[in-house]
Amino acid sequence: MVSTISGLKPRVNATPRNKPWENITVPNNNGPHIDRPPSPPAQPYSSSRTSTSGATPTILTRQLSSIALIILLYTAGMPFEPFGWTLGRLAGTYLFDRVFGGILLFSCFYFQYRIASLRASVIVSVPALVSPSGGSRIQNGRVVKDETTLSSTPVWVYRTSTYWHLAFSEGALLLLAEFGPSEILRRVIVVGVVSGLWLVGFAATPESYKRWAWGHIKAYLFFIILDEIRRVAFSAIGANSGGRRARQARW
């Protein structure tokens, strides 16, 4: 069809231009065959799921051994009076032993289990009185500065590969403390084991657990101190009235 408008050159209508999406051609069944990698074989259905967060046999063995060490520590450590052992017969040692002795010893029971459950190395550090802010932590196998923690000085890196060496050493020392001939030897061993568990276990405990435990420890200390105040008050009243023994037997 030719244009008839005057002043314009005649032009034959061209075929309309195809749109981009109209240039896509769909191959038919007779087109070339393209080789594709074979599909993987179907796996049989199983209702069991493998959890990577559960305890491995090695960790489970360490946890069972920690329970035996906890029983041995309790047997060898009782009665546990660290302030009376170190300070002698100074006034006030009984109060400190009653208030803090149970916390120090029973916290070691948790630390013992926590150390046995570790999956990675832990930096053991002590609080620093004069030091830049921040502590240290392990990242990608290296010791790096951690500004989010309290100021501390790293003294040792505990590795899980050394657990059994330390566990057998601790067990041997506690057996010596329990069946040894000297009471002074028992006290020295128990204080040393408790100090070591606090040093490593406190570093291995998450901050959220520490805050949770501190909230409960404050409540425990409140009732212990309140009970001591009651005992002192009633002892004084009983001594003045001549009925001290009767009141102690009553309460």
Image: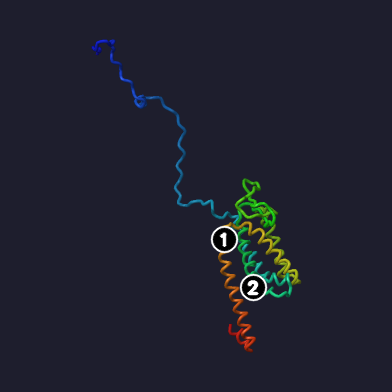
Question: Dot 1: few (<14), some (14–19), or many (≥20) neighbours within 10 Å?
Answer: few
Q: Amino acid at mark 1?
A: Arg
In the displayed structure, 89 sits above or below 128; it is below
Q: Earlier in the sequence, mark 1 or mark 2?
A: 2
Disc marking residue 250? none
Q: Which residue is mark 1?
A: 211
Q: CA distance from mark 1 to mark 2?
A: 23 Å
How far across and down, in percent of the image, does residue 119 sit? Answer: 60, 53
Q: Amino acid at mark 2?
A: Arg
Q: Quadrant of the C terminus?
A: bottom right
Residue closer to the observer: 118 or 250: 250
> Camera-side residue: 240 or 67?
240
Residue at 61% of width from left, 54% of height from top? 149
Q: Secondary structure at mark 2?
A: helix
Badge 2: few (under 14), some or many (20 or more) residues near its Cα, within 10 Å?
some
Q: Are marks 1 and 2 in contact (CB under 8 Å)?
A: no
Name the image quarter holding residue 65: bottom right
What residue sits 33% from the left and 20% below the top? Answer: 17
Residue 30, by quadrant, is top left
Question: Residue pushed farthest left?
Answer: 4
Q: Position of residue 188 (x, y in %)?
A: 73, 67
In the picture, the disc for residue 98 is 2
Residue 5 appears left or right of 96? left
Instruction: Classify mark 1: helix, strand or loop.
Output: helix
Q: Quadrant of the N terminus?
A: top left
Picture mark count? 2
Percent position of residue 211, x then y = 57, 61
The part of the image, by quadrant, that contains residue 200 is bottom right
Residue drawn at (51%, 52%) of the image: 51
Q: Is residue 226 above or below residue 110?
A: below
Residue lying farthest to the bottom in this orientation: 242
